[in-house]
Image: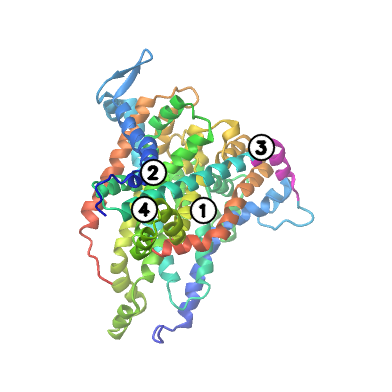
Amino acid sequence: MNRPRFRWHIVVFLAPAVLVYTAVMIFPLFNTLRLALYTEIDQSRVFVGLQNFQTLFFDPIWSEQFWNALGNNFWFFLIHMLVQNPIGIALAALLSHPRLRFAALYRSAIFIPTILSFVIVGFAWKLILSPIWGIAPSMLDAIGLKSLFAPWLGKEEYALTTLALISVWQFVGIPMMLIYAALLTIPEEILEAGEIDGITGASAFWKIKLPLILPSIGIISILTFVGNFNAFDLIYAAQGALAGPDFSTDILGTFMYRTFFGFQLQLGDPHMGSAIAGAMFAIILVGVCIYLFGIQTRMRRYQL
Amino acid sequence: MNKARHNPLNMIAMHGALILYTLIALFPIFVILINSFKSRRAIFREPLALPNADSFSMIGYETVMKQGDFFLYFQNSMIVTVASLFFVLLFGAMAAYALSEYQFKGNLVMGLYLALGIMIPIRIGTVAILEMMVATGLVNTLWALILVYTAQGLPLAVFILSEFMRQVSDDLKNAGRIDGLSEYTIFFRLVLPLVRPAMATVAVFNMIPIWNDLWFPLILAPAEETKTLTLGSQVFIGQFVTDWNAVLSALSMAILPVLILYVIFSRQLIRGITSGAVK
């Protein structure tokens, strides 16, 4: 292999991927972080250091929006962790039962919402929850709970939670599939050994399977985290760029879009937009680092 | 598996739970689809009834056909998705082959560099991407989208494909070398056909997010002639909010292509996920 002459074919094989990836992904990423340090004065770009971040975090007009969006984003993430992932794990546990019939059918059907676009999902739920159409109220009426109905997407106190649950409805297929795959890799002998010791059914799940699939749960958590902190589409499709009512569903993605692209009367500000992107980058980086160094390395892995 | 766990009541409960969740998953889609074929009055009077001779109406679809340019949107989405997948697979496989086949200085560093993008979403760089596309005149062209989706798909493609390429037998490649084949011929003729299943997995993983993306079409290519189906339906529905027939029909028309693709590729997709390609 170690011929003295330069192996050009390696360069040829690597070049297209590295060029496109560097030019369209890595370079803009750093360029965005750089732009966050500039501002526009009299149509020329001026370096201002960290001033944009100072404005974002401390100027009352900006910081109120920023902390609101960040808080909403955490709530959005929390609902996914508390609702989506447990339901996904439960469905996977049911589906992986060895003698369950129609498992493939259930699996394919439950995964369907995941393949739909946010636009479809957002509008479909908007219609279904709409008080004008009345599907949701009349269904609640059928089980005697009509008094519980409210125009959930239009109320400040419920809108964000409702959207988070819609997103959970859409994406529950992903944790389900990944956990299902992990459960399938557990060897039969381990479960049988547990059975001999009298561990069956639910306790087999809690005591044997769950510890074995913890690494997959870790991966799902970080995927959920990254996905939630750059979410945008569902909120935009259902509530528009203003993330109404009264910014109660504003998350970092919609806040960044409004800021750098502008909306209605406000002009777009690429530099403040970059600053928000920088903050999002930092949050995602911190989350990924916590996962990689704090959780993944400490997680006990079992040799199967 | 064993008799100790055999309990018919348990089985019924499990089916009950799964059926309940399946209904929750499919109900909204079902409601949208059936109502898109009904007249306006029927939509409101009996939203859950199937369309019958009395309530059947295609008025919504007629409006969509007349007002929106859905064939153009569909064509744009198709071009963007297919071209992006082509470049992701071609460039991704080439890079994966270089990383898995050859020992060279910087191999590990290059691998890590390309893997960075798996965790960091490309959306963070949107401001600079838009600026670059404006500067190069690519804004409002399908090329802008194709480039972005190619860059977005490459990290995971390289990662998955290089795992698979390590499993291709060295004897086969060396036999090719002894026969005097060039490295390019070995790659395209011998290695690529062997990793086709992995390429299909990568393609299916990338296809859905590209087809469904709203962010980049909205920012990079919002012009009428470059709208994708996702953006087109978003704009169309936004304009026709009060025309329920049109909105429901537009939604159905956006659902159907994805549903058909899913039926064709669901095996591949599910096999890809469950074979541990993303572990």
Q: Where does residue B79 sit, x and y in percent of width and height?
A: 56, 42
Q: Which residue type carries mark 4?
A: Tyr
Crowding at label 4, few (<14), some or many (≥20) Cα neighbours within 10 Å?
many
Asked if marks 4 and 3 touch (Cβ < 8 Å), the reply is: no
Q: Which residue is mark 3?
A: B68
Q: Which residue is mark 4?
A: B97
Asked if marks 3 and 1 touch (Cβ < 8 Å), the reply is: no
Which residues are drawn in magenta? B57-71
Q: Which residue is mark 2?
A: A17
Q: Where does residue B233 sit, x and y in percent of width and height?
A: 59, 41
Q: CA distance from mark 3 to mark 2?
A: 37 Å
Q: Where does residue A202 sit, x and y in percent of width and height?
A: 36, 75
Q: CA distance from mark 2 to mark 1?
A: 27 Å
Q: Where does residue B239 sit, x and y in percent of width and height?
A: 62, 34
- Circle on res. A115: 1
Q: Residue at x 32, y 48 (%)?
A: B115
